[in-house]
Image (cartoon, rainbow, N blue to C red):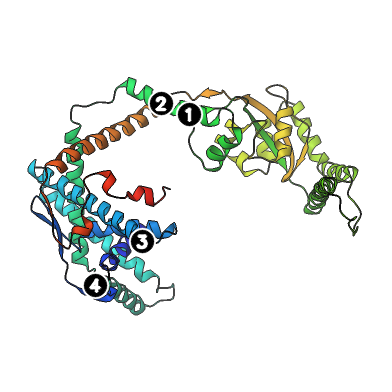
Amino acid sequence: MKKLLAMLLALSLLLSVTAVFAEGENTETAAAEEPVLLATINGEPVYSDNSYLNYVANYYMEYASYYGYDTSDPELLAAIRQNAMLYTLQSLLILQKAKEMGMDQFTDEEKAQYTEEAREQWAAIVEDYAAENITEDSSEEDKAAARADALSELMNMGYDEERYVSEYVDGELNDTMVVRMEDSLVQGKTVTDEEIQAYYDGLVNADKEAYEKDVPTYEYYTQYYGQSSYYTPEGYRSVIHILLPVEDELMNAWKDLSARLEEQADTEESTDAEPTAEPEVTEEPVTEEMVKAAEQAILDSVQAKVDEIKAKLAEGASFEDLIKEYGTDPGMQDDETRAAGYPIHAESIMYDPAFTAAAMKLEKIGDVGEPVVGQYGVHILKYLKDIQSGAQELTDEMKDEFRITLEENQKVEAMNAALTEWMAAAEIVYTEDGEAWKVQETAEDTASVDELVPED
């Protein structure tokens, strides 16, 4: 729903965008003028109020503004105009070709379905607007008034139900024609198993080059951002753990002493590097013994539970069942996560260093370590398994996913090739008003928006 509202808001800016490109004119005056003819393609006109033309121009304007570019810069404006016109001409040309090939035939049932969808979405848009002024205590009269206000606001944006339905249906019909065109261009083409394997090998090699010797970057992108990786660096193991809670007073005391000891060490290093006047001592220096005593106090506080856990393990209880009984880590309460364990490497950056160090000290699969104090409590870890390094196995599910990707790539390549031929053969005529929007024939003649506006 928010996407639909965003589209309506974007469309409401079309006249203002046109005004920006009307150089030297007052914005309000330019916005109120009648649309002018900018160009024709095979006789089909492109006016200054063309929705697609202005939508693309607005997109680039907002993009450039977001990244701090001067949106009054003539070079930037020229690039935006020309790219917006290029995309508009291409979209019109695709639809022209689709109609020439008879792809514009639709049944009454198909049109009726799109119309019904449009009216449902319009009603939802109105309700969404009205909801901002409706509460649980609103009377029916209040709700009716809110809906009336919503309709009025949409009308001020230039929209009513019939216009919305008409544009929605036209858009769906055009989208369907484009899909039909894409399908026709790749008719008879297939994606082979060899192509899938080559695509997969490329992904593996790219990830290997990026991550083989850089575990922090691997974890940053795969675990922090959740990106897929088709290559796993060597040295990973899987661990599970029981996290025991600790009283706040004990935990805070240990954290405070640890932080102060680290701060003292940093200060001493700085003093050794650049001798200065002896700093004024305001509190007792922290020693390693004090930190260890605070750590031992934490371990002593959970010793009874640790003894219970060890006794149950000795009696044959499974570590996994004890996680569910004693553990407080939410991740370990999830069946899939518990079965897979946490992937840990000696160079891991995603975990508490104490947790990572304890995990890497375990010598063999199945080992259960002694309790260790970490930032979130006391951990008892189990070495679950080793994680296979190298290329990820190419599964049937992955093959299906890659096949879809490659099929889409085929369609894009086929459409681009067809567009190049169609544009070369098309009769494109610009008016005097459209000269500023004229698509240059060579890349050297026009600045690329991709060069002026950085990619995401």
Q: Is residue 297 left or right of residue 175?
A: right
Q: Amino acid at mark 4?
A: Ala
Name the residue located 23 percent from the left edge and 56 percent from the top edge.
117
Please say if the residues under marks 1 and 2 sit with CB atoms less than 8 Å apart: yes
- If you read the primary sequence from the N terminus, does the residue marked by circle 4 or circle 3 appear first? 4
Residue that mark 4 sits on: 30
**Left-right relation of 309 to 338:** right
Assign a secondary structure to mark 1: loop
Instruction: Tell me the quarter of the image containing the N terminus.
Output: bottom left
First in sequence, mark 3 or 1: give its number: 3
Q: Secondary structure at mark 3?
A: loop
**Residue bearing mark 2:** 200
Residue at horizontal 78 percent and vertical 39 percent from the top: 305
User: Which is nearer the eye, 360 or 430?
Assistant: 430
Q: Which residue is mark 1?
A: 230
**Amino acid at the residue labelled 3:** Asp
Real-space CA distance between mark 3 and mark 2, rounded to the nearest whole angstrom: 43 Å
User: Mark 3 — residue?
Assistant: 73
The secondary element bearing badge 4 is classed as helix
* Residue 142 x %, y %: 36, 78
Residue 87 vs 222, above or below: the answer is below
Q: Residues within 10 Å of mark 1 (few under 14, many from 20)?
A: some
Foreground: disc 3 or disc 1: 3
The amino acid type of the residue labelled 1 equals Tyr
Q: Residue 18: horizontal and vertical position, in percent?
A: 25, 65
Asked if one can make out residue 116 in the rendered structure from this viewpoint, the answer is no
